[in-house]
Structure formats: structure tokens, C-alpha cells
Image (tube, rainbow, N blue to C red):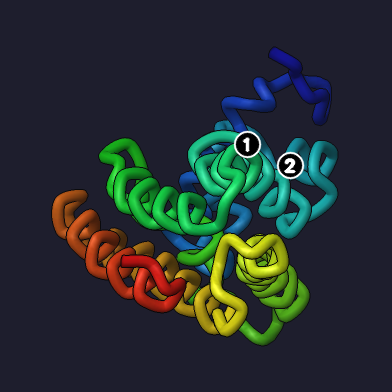
């Protein structure tokens, strides 16, 4: 596991990013001060700046770490599901499972952190919004590909289905953060899936 040099010392990069990820996840971008981050990461401020350049640099390194680990279910679903109905069902049910794991603060780091970003950190808020919107755009593309292939009805409103799915998944993240159980969110996923099937013209 690679170490990062800072102020004459080395620290475990993956271990530091895990702790930073959890700090940002718990406190939000604004709430996780440099003092909080360095205390929880077990490093000093010069080491943080030497390794990541800034608090913002550390945050997006933590986001990448999250996306490659706990948040990777979404990327895997996009990569592995060939048809949009199966993709949507998987996203809904895996969100219910992942967002309620007991070894984290609950919900999604990218969704949760976005609710606590001040105007002073507008670039951070913009990048987080772009990440969320990119997933909805990508889902719309998958749905449109199925319409073009004739596997979904021509009248299907691809954007509406993608937006609906995104709203449900983001709402599930907030409910998980508020303590909703896996069982409760699986019920939400089931209800949403029934609605999506109707929108897609499935029976």
C-alpha cells in the first residue's frame, strides 16, 4: 500500500483516504474542517497540503476513493447490465442495500455532502451536481438506446424515467441517513420499480 511523503513522514494513503471519506461523509464538505480532517486522518496540516494540495483536493480524492469502493455499485451496474429495465431495477435495489450498510454514516457520500456546501465552495457544489447529473444523463442514454433498438416502446419518455429513477435513488440516500432500514428502502425500491415498469410499458 503506497505511502505519501509529507513533512518528513509517510502515511498510509488508502487508510488516510478512508478516514477522510468518513469525515466528509459524517460532517459534509463545510463541516469537515482541516483541523477535523487532520485529527481523524492522524496527520498534520502540512502533510495534507503536500499530499493533496488543498482541502478540495483531498475531498475529491476521497470521492474517487468512495466511487472505487463503497459507491462502486452504480458503476458496476452501468457496466454489467445490457438493458435499461434490468439496470434500473438493479440500481434501485442495490441502493437500498448499499445505503444502509452499518459500517458507514448511511446514504451516499456524493449526495449527502452536497447538502452541506456553502456558497464559498461553489466549485465543489458544481462538481458534485455534475457527478449526480451525469448518472441521470447516462441512464437516459441507456433507455434511448433500448428505444432505438425496439426493446422499449417508441413513446417511452426516456428523460422522465431517468429523472424519476434519480429522484428515488437520491431520496433513498437521504432516508438512509435519517435511519431508514434496508427493509424499508427495499420496499421503496419495489414500489418505484413497479412505477418504472409501467412507464416502460412492461407488465
Residue 199 visible: yes
Q: Position of residue 109 (x, y in %)?
A: 50, 55
At x 55%, y 44%, the residue is 77
Residue visible at 71% across and 52% down in the picture: 60
Q: Is residue 6 left or right of residue 78?
A: right
Q: Is residue 55 left or right of residue 109?
A: right
Point 67% across, 53% down: residue: 59
**What's the mark number on residue 48?**
2
Disc 1/disc 2 C-alpha distance (Å):
21 Å
- Is residue 202 left or right of 163 when viewed as pictured? left
Q: Which x, y percent locates residue 23?
A: 48, 49
Relative placement, left or right, of 90 versus 2 is left
Taking depth in this image into account, of 183 and 9 the one nearest to the observer is 183
Whether residue 20 is visible here, answered yes or no, is: no
Residue 62 drawn at (x, y percent)? 64, 45
Q: Which residue is mark 1?
A: 68
Amino acid at each position: 500500500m503506497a505511502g505519501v511523503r509529507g513533512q518528513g513522514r509517510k502515511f498510509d494513503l488508502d487508510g488516510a483516504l478512508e478516514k477522510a471519506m468518513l469525515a466528509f461523509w459524517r460532517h459534509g464538505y463545510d463541516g469537515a474542517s482541516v483541523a477535523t480532517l487532520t485529527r481523524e486522518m492522524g496527520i498534520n496540516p502540512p502533510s495534507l497540503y503536500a499530499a493533496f494540495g488543498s482541502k478540495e483536493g483531498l475531498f475529491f480524492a476521497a470521492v474517487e476513493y468512495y466511487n472505487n469502493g463503497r459507491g462502486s455499485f452504480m458503476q458496476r451496474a452501468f457496466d454489467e447490465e445490457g438493458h435499461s429495465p434490468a439496470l434500473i431495477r438493479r440500481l434501485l435495489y442495490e441502493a437500498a442495500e448499499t445505503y444502509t450498510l452499518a459500517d458507514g454514516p448511511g446514504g451516499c457520500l456524493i449526495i449527502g455532502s452536497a447538502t452541506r456546501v456553502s456558497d464559498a465552495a461553489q466549485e465543489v457544489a458544481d462538481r458534485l451536481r455534475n457527478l449526480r447529473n451525469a448518472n441521470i444523463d447516462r441512464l437516459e442514454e441507456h433507455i434511448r438506446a433500448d428505444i432505438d433498438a425496439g426493446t422499449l416502446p417508441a413513446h417511452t419518455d426516456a428523460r422522465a424515467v431517468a429523472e424519476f429513477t434519480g429522484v428515488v435513488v437520491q431520496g433513498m440516500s437521504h432516508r438512509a441517513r435519517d435511519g431508514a432500514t434496508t427493509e424499508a428502502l427495499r420496499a421503496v425500491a419495489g414500489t418505484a420499480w413497479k412505477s418504472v415498469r409501467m412507464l416502460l410499458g412492461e407488465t
